[in-house]
Image (cartoon, rainbow, N blue to C red):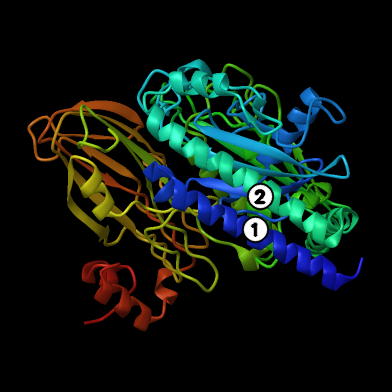
Amino acid sequence: MDAITIQILRNKIASLVDEMHYHFYRSGYSTIIRESRDFSCVILDREGRLIVSPPMFFHAPVYRHLVGRVLELYGPGGDIGEGDVFVSNHPYEGGLPHVSDMAFVAPVFANGDIVAFAGSIAHKADVGGTVPGSTSANATEMFHEGVLVPPIKIRDAGRVLPDIERFILANSRQPTLVGGDMTAQIAVTQMGATRVGELCARFGAATVTGAFAAILRGAAEELRGAIAKLPEASSSAEGFLDNDGVAIDKPVKLAVTINIRDGVAEFDFTGSDPQARGPINLRPSMVEACVFYSLIGSLGPRLHFNDGMRDCIRIVVAPNTVVNASPPSPVSNYQMVNLKLVDVILEAMARLNPTRACAHAGSSSALLIAWAKGRPGQSAMQYEIVGSAYGGGQGSDGASCTAAHLSNLHVTPIEILESEYPCRIRQFNIVPDTGGAGQWRGGVSFQREYELLEDAMIIRRFDKSRFPPGGVGGGGDGAGGRFVVRVGAPDEIETRASGRYDLKAGDRFLIQSAGGGGFGDPRARDKASVARDVAEGYVSADKARKIYGLEG
């Protein structure tokens, strides 16, 4: 095929993914969708291979596993027809990150054959389980985390299957929110399938599928060329999660050895700890997401990710380990594990390509508040993504107050929180000196203090308190994450582990994200940059003198 047609169709698919994304968050019922944007929308080839990556990167490798299972169960050439939509939230049978993430996929037909799939994955406000919001900080089996839906049809030849929807919603504490988000998600998935069908009618199905194949080959060739520039060598690294949420005093090891041989990059995770009792276990799709993200970041940001890249890497995971758990191991807290695993992979990659090295990032995390009543006409379920900070890297300071790595999620604005929920935000500000010192400074933390206006149950999930983000090349560590419960009260406590807390109206709590690690010797930092850090509140005057040697 000619390169111009391939590029036109690549851009058509990228624009379609953006269109699906826009319609979904504009149609979402929950703040998880319309504020945090905790979802992805994609177009896949007939085998479920991703063509263009969505903004929510860590969902990208999941679809291949899900569609592969759908094809195994229903086809090809079997019980899959036009107008069908399949649903699943199963981490083990569908490859989903955790039970709260629900996926929908719809086939695209041309001339009676499957030529593509449209898909979407989105976090749901509540899918049952032992706690409101479903994402328990200390579940010990996946059945604690919500109702499990294996890959099944929810639309059959365009016909609604109400029993399936009734079953899912009957297991939710927030059926209105979940039902509204499901309806919007199904609609954008069907819209994506329709648009790809229109492309097939306009360009011809053979041209569209040929372009998909060329796009996949092109990504593989790009990555293979980038890997060929690395030295043939091995590099290892390891890091520790604070705990698994159940055994609070026991760290959990993540380890990788990267081998570059014959143009193929092998990532061996067999040195990682056995699967955990608490909900910090990963499915292979999440390990793949961390590998591809870290590899592309270490080689060059202009690489186009899609499933064609699978041909250039090899991932080795041992069974029954934290990076390849077996059912019924719980997986709710997978994202903070992703972020730690990215740190470990980037540390190992830095020895193979030092020019792209960077310090460890903070850990984006989650906060859930289940209100006793909630505001009239609003949901009683408040779910937030808590941003963090990036580590410094060669030639660049770490970004502050943002979701770190992989997700591209949004922090919910104060105006939304105070208008929709019975809470008051007492403070929301950056915290000086929380970014690791270095020639290139780590991003700084932010903190929020909440005052409850009615009784509520709080679930806080976070990491990098016991083991703060590390610096690189002489850079300092970033500050660890903090969670302070009942601020200012005689029974105030600061916890260093994820947990659940029942609080009363008038109680306050404070969350502080971790800061990014620093890169390089702090004394080598440009003094004008240090002065600007002081002026903007990132670094205190005292630390500027003692660590950076700023005079005056």
Residue lying at 25% horizontally and 76% vertically, measured from the top left: 535
Apparent side of residue 487 relative to residue 498 in the rendered image (left or right): left
Residue 416, percent from left and from top: 27, 51
Front position in the image: 264 or 503: 503
Residue lying at 90% horizontally and 70% vertically, measured from the top left: 2
Front position in the image: 105 or 61: 105
Q: Pick whichever of labels 1 and 2 is earlier in the sequence.
A: 1
Apparent side of residue 275 relative to residue 243 in the rendered image (left or right): right
Do we see residue 141 in this rendering? no
Do we see residue 119 in this rendering? yes
For the residue labelled by badge 1, is the local secondary structure a helix, a strand or a loop? Answer: helix
Q: Residues within 10 Å of mark 1 (few under 14, many from 20)?
A: many
Q: Amino acid at mark 1?
A: Leu
Q: Does residue 189 sit above or below 507 in this rendering?
A: below
For the residue labelled by badge 2, is the local secondary structure a helix, a strand or a loop? Answer: helix
Q: Amino acid at mark 2?
A: Gly
* Quarter of the image where one finds residue 326: top right
Residue tagged 2:
192
Residue 16, percent from left and from top: 65, 58
Residue lying at 71% horizontally and 63% vertically, measured from the top left: 12
Residue 378, percent from left and from top: 27, 38
The CA distance from mark 1 to mark 2 is 7 Å
Residue 48, percent from left and from top: 76, 41
As drawn, the residue found furthest toward the left would be: 490
Q: Does residue 307 sit above or below 245 in this rendering?
A: below
Say which mark, if any, is on residue 16. Answer: 1
Residue lying at 23% horizontally and 55% vertically, measured from the top left: 428
For the C terminus, give its image quadrant: bottom left
Q: Does residue 470 sit above or below 158 in this rendering?
A: below
